[in-house]
Amino acid sequence: MNRGDLILISVDEAKRLAKKNLSPKRYEHTCNVRKLAVKLAKAHGAGEKKAGLAALLHDIAKELPRDRLLQIFTENAIIAGNAAQRPAPVWHGAAAAILAQTQYGVDDGEILSAIRCHTTGKPHMSKLDKVLYLADMASYERTYPEAAALREHALKDLDKTMVEALGMSISWLKETGKPVDELSLQAYAQLRAELYGGNASGTTPSSEAGPKAD
């Protein structure tokens, strides 16, 4: 679809790009994320086509080397913002959003936002942001014990499941000595305060455990 000088990438082209740029295991994950994202989007009115496209592109930069990710940030400094100053494990989300916008013609702000924050979350997430975050964290090949419960919970209530998932992710990162992105802490505090009341500042999970590393 032509939009000025941009061409909005088709689903078929996004599939080809994902298959070309990702290992078989990562491509399988991408397809599983797409399947769950579309299911969640349908359940919550988040836009199934947007969810599917965001899912196909969310990990497009996952297997790029560190130097290439930094090059993407340098060449697109305005779009990248402070991406390079954040923990390296979350760089691929920002890089994927930049590639989607600058090379694949994705000019839909909702899709770009979902791709960018699919690993970290962020305060005041859209439905599509939440759909992709949860689809990635609980995709069908995930084997950690809480994954199936997250899939079930996400179909019923996106916001409560986001609090659950962010809490699990933050706790797991802390317990394993990995860096926690500030946006994750902010997203958790904002959503928890919105749902359950109280002061959002300083609110951090204490007892949950579970991974969110992709």
Image (spheres, helix red, strand yellow):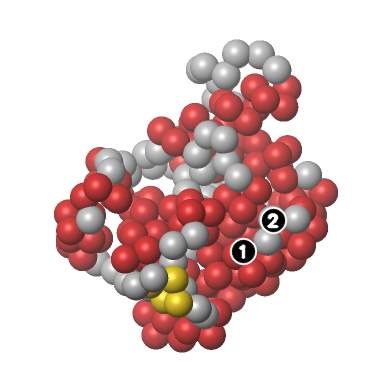
Q: Are marks 1 and 2 in contact (CB under 8 Å)?
A: yes
Q: Where does the image place residue 99, in percent across and percent down from the top left?
A: 34, 66
Decide if residue 81 is on the left or right side of residue 9: left
- The kind of residue on which mark 2 rests is Ala
- The kind of residue on which mark 1 rests is Ala
* Residue at the spot 23% in from the left edge and 61% down from the top edge: 72
* Residue at the spot 34% in from the left edge and 72% down from the top edge: 5
In the rendered view, tell whether residue 174 sits above or below residue 40. above
Q: Secondary structure at mark 1?
A: helix
Tell which of 94 and 170 is nearer to you: 94
* Residue at the spot 47% in from the left edge and 64% down from the top edge: 58
Per the model, the C-alpha gap separating discs 1 and 2 is 7 Å
Tell which of 79 and 24 is nearer to you: 79
Identify the mark at residue 46; answer none if there is no mark: 2
Decide if residue 69 is on the left or right side of residue 122: left
Q: Badge 2: few (under 14), some or many (20 or more) residues near its Cα, within 10 Å?
A: many
Q: Where does the image place residue 73, in percent across and percent down from the top left?
A: 23, 54
Identify the mark at residue 51; answer none if there is no mark: 1
Could one spot residue 96 in this view of the protein?
Answer: no
